[in-house]
Amino acid sequence: MTAEPEDAVAPAVDLLADRAGAFAGAPAVEPAPRTGPAPDAPVVLAVRDLHKRYGAIEAVKGVSFEIRQGETYGLLGPNGAGKTTTISMVCGLLASDGGEVTLDGTPIDVGAVAAKAGIGYVPQELAIYPDLTARENLAFFGRLYGLGGAALKTRVEEVLALIGLSERGNDRTDHFSGGMQRRLNIGIGLLHGPRLLLLDEPTVGVDPQSRNAILESIAALGRAGMAILYTTHYMEEAERLCDRIAIIDGGEIRAEGTQKQLVALIGGHEEVRLSLSGNLKAAARAAGAVRGVQSAAAKGDLVEVLAADAGRVLPRVLEAVEGAGARVKGVELVTPDLEAVFLHLTGRALRDAD
């Protein structure tokens, strides 16, 4: 790989400088809201009609999507859905059987060495040497990226700081926890200041605290303007991180959009569960008559109400059921999520599909 000018590398490395504390195990903070890409943000990655076959098995079937600068795009699906095969073709590690991948308009394939320098790939399997220290691992991969001399030393120290491993830089990585190894794995992908960061299931096997720190730091990268492709089978991660999400199953993208757009595929209705005492059937009839309520039914000791905007109609629903002589003991708002969307699209639950 050819070396990049230092001034082209530094901005991307600095994107997470203020997040080093999160990696180091600082108390979790409430995630900042996503802003998404600017309306006129350029397309960084374009994937068109990708195909991959292994003998009689078609692992990827015409996958297409694009990612803009500052956008975090998620591939959500169970194990075996085609996520890793897709991301391997996107970064030029695996030859496709058809289709096209471009990075900033430049084609990416197995032989596109110079173009692939704009990609930071963080694989699902740890890509670190256990008998080397964290600092030695970073220096080794930095040299592969064409960095050297004082610039490489500076970059290694900056990355160690941003992933919260400065004090453990001289320790062998086989002495690291799973979360520390994952943080180093991500640091290697950021070392050369890529235009596009590819993350393949980066939180597998980490503890909850490290997982939260990793997710918040990835979110900070997106807010700072990096294009990110994130694969996961965890619905919660996709909902938290991704500006747009593609639901992939059986090698095909079944649906794509923002979380709100995907939930709208199943009607976009929210459910309110009212725990009541009194005449529940009368309460259900009263709730069902409220404008904006799609349906209301008594089930056991609950009245379940469906509405397009439950938060808006809830005060009127409560007034109606109390007017029908019921006493409200509890209220639960259930918002449709990506699990429900996956079930709607595939006929099975996302967690069961694994």
Image (cartoon, rainbow, N blue to C red):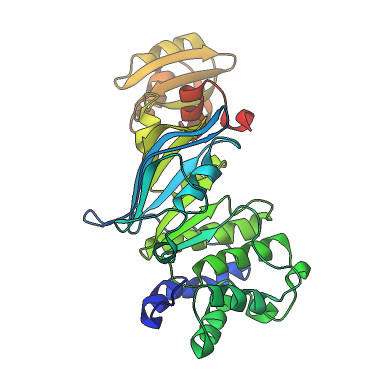
Q: Nearer the viewer, residue 343 or 57?
A: 57
What residue do we see at 53% from left, 38% from top?
82
Q: x, y percentage for residue 198?
A: 48, 56
Is the residue 10 above or below the residue 119 in the image?
below
Look at the image and tell me in which quarter the C terminus lies: top right
Q: Quadrant of residue 206?
A: bottom right
Q: Nearer the viewer, residue 247 or 8?
A: 8
Is 21 displayed left or right of 195 in the figure?
A: right
What residue do we see at 41% from left, 48% from top?
73
Residue 324 visible in the shown view: no
Is 48 displayed left or right of 193 in the figure?
A: left
Number of dots carrying numbers: 0
Residue 202 visible in the shown view: yes
Is the residue 154 above or below the residue 318 in the image?
below
What residue do we see at 56% from left, 60% from top?
214
What residue do we see at 59% from left, 68% from top?
23
Q: x, y percentage for residue 129?
A: 70, 68
Q: Quadrant of residue 228?
A: bottom left
Q: x, y percentage for residue 4?
A: 40, 77
Residue farthest along the bottom direction in this orientation: 150
Is 217 displayed left or right of 169 in the figure?
A: left
Q: x, y percentage for residue 96?
A: 46, 43
